Amino acid sequence: MNIQENISLKNHNTFGIDVKARFFVEITGLVQLQKVLELKAYPKKFIISGGSNMLLTKDIDALVVHIKLKGISIVEENENFVEVKAMAGENWHELVMWSLDQGFGGLENLSLIPGNVGTAPIQNIGAYGVELKDVFVSCAAMEVKTGELEGFDNEACEFGYRESIFKNKAKGKYIITSVVLKLTKKDHVLHTGYGSIENELKDKGIVHPTIRDISDAVIAIRRSKLPDPTEIGNSGSFFKNPVISRKAFDKFIKKNPNAPFYEVDDDQFKIPAGWLVEQCGFKGKRFGEAGVHEKQALVLVNYGGATGKEILDLSKKIQEDVQKTFKIKIQPEVNIIK
Ligand SMILES: Cc1cc2nc3c(=O)[nH]c(=O)nc-3n(C[C@H](O)[C@H](O)[C@H](O)COP(=O)(O)OP(=O)(O)OC[C@H]3O[C@@H](n4cnc5c(N)ncnc54)[C@H](O)[C@@H]3O)c2cc1C
């Protein structure tokens, strides 16, 4: 096993923050991972996959374990469904493309989400009306303390909006090593009602879309709206959309009658965080090397030389302004590594 020292993580996080890992190792096998967890010489470990959901604010004084476990296989199938097992280090979008090549439905709305398969359950990735939990069967996770593998089914993961047990009570305790997803082989359930998918299909003259058409539409919309991290450092949506009670919503909407919102249930309303940030005047604003994207107020960007702390400070300023203006707390979706 090749443990390297003082490795820059600039190319391992999509914000492009230049911090160093005290030690760094790449993991390609489960036994190797178990051995690394046993190493007494490196008591502190930090797990990294695609680096697309983290803001690194300082050097990592630990052994950074880069998960590169690979492999995709079919573990069960009948004439209607298939269960696909993908190892944690597979790229998420490549898995989506693979599933479409096989004619399997379920992942098309989740096209082009950066990052790896093993991290998808952590925040229950979601986009365009679909969340991972809709297709998720189970995952295997190695306990950091013992090196033992455990299984988590859909219920055990305690999925919520950008939430799971792995972000809450099991935070830092497990390394997800593989994920099993249930996909359709026929009679695919299409989700076209969210965002501008319908418009995109209409523009192309598509009346009866296939799963591939939906994926293509999602990819086109995402490319037009979201900055490409290879061109400008970012971590996608920096904040989660706040969910507020009916009482708070009634007050809010009275003061802001033109505000967009989604009714989650009778007592819960989701307000787009991007709208709140934009109303506070941050959209397109640059503060040194850090800034807020010109097309999408929810995306904080690194113009090149920003430190993690500069981006963190900007995010705190945005939170404070939104709180002051709307009396609404917005929370980061991105994992802040302090
Ligand atoms: C341009 C852009 C657009 C995005 N759009 C979306 C979107 O539409 N929807 C959405 O939900 N997300 C979106 N994201 C966020 C991101 O893509 C997802 O959260 C993704 O699942 C992160 O995967 P990753 O492999 O990059 O995780 P990383 O950033 O490597 O890790 C995230 C966290 O998980 C921990 N971790 C890493 N690997 C493991 C593992 N195997 N086991 C346990 N813990 C681990 C890390 O320590 C860290 O705390 C977007 C990001 C970008 C940059």
Image: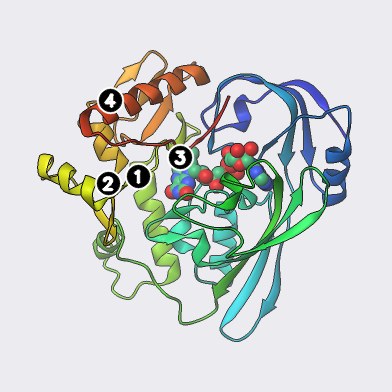
Residue position marked by numbered label 3 in the rendering: 333
The Cα atoms of the two marked residues, 4 and 3, are separated by: 18 Å
Amino acid type of disc 1? Asn
Which residue is pictured at 39% across the width and 72% down the height?
190
Q: Are marks 2 and 1 in contact (CB under 8 Å)?
A: yes
Q: Which residue is mark 4?
A: 321
Decide if residue 80 is on the left or right side of residue 269. Answer: right
Residue depicted at 33% across the width and 35% down the height? 329
Query: Residue 96: image x %, image y %?
Result: 55, 60
Question: Can you tell me whether the CB of the residue at mark 2 lies under 8 Å from the nearest atom of ligand 1?
Answer: no
Is any part of residue 28 visible from this angle? Answer: yes
Q: Is residue 166 above or below residue 332?
A: below
At label 1, counting other C-alpha atoms closer than 10 Å, the crowd grade (few under 14, some 14-19, many 20 or more) is: many
- C-alpha span from label 2 to label 1: 6 Å
Task: State the CA–CA distance, disc 2 to disc 4.
Answer: 16 Å
Q: Which residue is mark 1?
A: 241
Disc 2, disc 3: CB below 8 Å? no
Q: Which corner quadrant of the image does residue 328 belong to?
A: top left
Disc 2 marks which residue? 271
Mark 4 / mark 3, whichever is N-terminal: 4
Q: Please report whichever mark, 2 or 4, sits nearer to the chain's N-terminal start.
A: 2
